[in-house]
Amino acid sequence: MPTSTDKQPRLKSGDKPAAIPAPKSLIGFSTEENSPFTDGYSITGEEALLAAYMAGPMHEDDPLYERYIELEDRKDQLARMQAKFQTRKGSDPDVKPAEFFAMDDLGSLVDSEDDLMTLHTKEAFRLFMGRVREPGSDVAPIVGGRRVASSLRSLWLLTGNDNPYADWSLLRHEQSMEEVNERLQEEIKAAENLLSSQQQRGLSYSVLKSAQPQSLQLGFRSPYGYSISRLIVDYDYFIRLQKTLGRKTLLSDQQMRRSITETTRFIRRVFNEVARFSRWLMQPDINALSRLDFITEHASEEGKQRVEFVREVFGMVPADVFTAKLQPRHSRRRYTLTEKERNLLQSVGVQLAEAEAQRAADEYQDADSDLV
């Protein structure tokens, strides 16, 4: 007579026995809305509930012991889930390993061709190249566009430290560049209109250009460098127009030189301010400056010295810049603040705003007293 064992189906070679389901658990647990587990299990909630138990001897006969074992198991599960997520690059389940591993071999974006800037005038070349102090001469050096582009890159990189003065410098540069571009476009439009008016009378004048224009490779490594190249080529065209008007006697030599000199000085003032910010903020003892240095509770002694230094050199950073209400167009700032740090920074911003209002009131009062 067959036994009960004989009635059981035999497993074929290579087959795995079916998984044996676990009994229903009577252990309660904390839940949370965004839990990574389908049953809503909350690791942080359980850690808080079991904190006192885990701080003690953790007896196995304690009713909380099973919850502790479950907590450790869930931590292991979460670690495996996170490892799988990282391995798969967070891709959808349908994505094959060969596909998500190919992402590691993907190269960075590079220019398909060299970026070039073509110039026709020596004035534009000098504005781009700058000029160092000549040995044995008292003539002041000239800050050029290439150096300014390098300074802007340094300031742009400093924004990655959450440096409010780097933000301030870039905001100042953007504002000044808008003013420079507006002035250049006005001068260019006025010159083009003057040439156009001659054409309406029957005189067609061509704009002067170099017999051998020169192209320079740019290769800037920050977004701000390219704004400098646009400024240089606009300035180059402005010079060509002014010299065209002078040669065609639509402007006197004095008028032409004055227009070129005033516009060039305006641009150099912008360049000099950028170089000044970069020169001081890139000092080895200062380049680690961050917004947290302004919070007394967090600042180290070195941080306090950095704050004192920049206040002495530049004055106090505007409140709207410090609180990031105003931000530069391009920034490497990726710093994530805690709620406490955010509140502290806001309180510092309020103090700065109050100080600005007080200074404005004092200046207004001084102006009134001068009228008496």
Image (cartoon, rainbow, N blue to C red):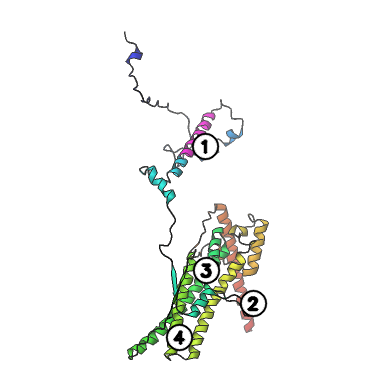
> Element at badge 3?
helix
Badge nearest the viewer, 3 or 1: 3
Q: Is residue 363 magenta?
A: no
Q: Which residue is mark 3?
A: 149
Query: Looking at this view, is 11 or 131 the one in front?
Result: 131
Mark 1 or mark 3, which is nearer the start of the sequence? 1
Badge nearest the viewer, 2 or 4: 2
Q: Crowdedness of circle 2 by 10 Å Cα count: few (<14), some, many (20+)?
A: few
Mark 3 or mark 4, which is nearer the start of the sequence? 3
Mark 2 or mark 3, which is nearer the start of the sequence? 2
Asked if marks 4 and 3 touch (Cβ < 8 Å), the reply is no
Q: Amino acid at mark 1?
A: Glu
Name, please, the residue furthest toward the front. 212
Q: Is residue 220 above or below residue 292?
A: below
From mark 3 to mark 2, how far is it between C-alphas?
Answer: 25 Å
Residue at 50% x, 83% y: name it: 260
Task: Name the image quarter holding the N terminus.
Answer: top left
Q: Which residue is mark 1?
A: 46
Query: Looking at this view, is 157 or 322 the one in front?
Result: 157
Residue numbers of the magenta segment: 64-80
Q: Which residue is mark 2?
A: 135
Task: Name the image quarter holding the C terminus.
Answer: bottom right
> Element at badge 1?
helix
Q: Amino acid at mark 3?
A: Ala
Characterize the magenta stretch by its predominant secondary structure: helix
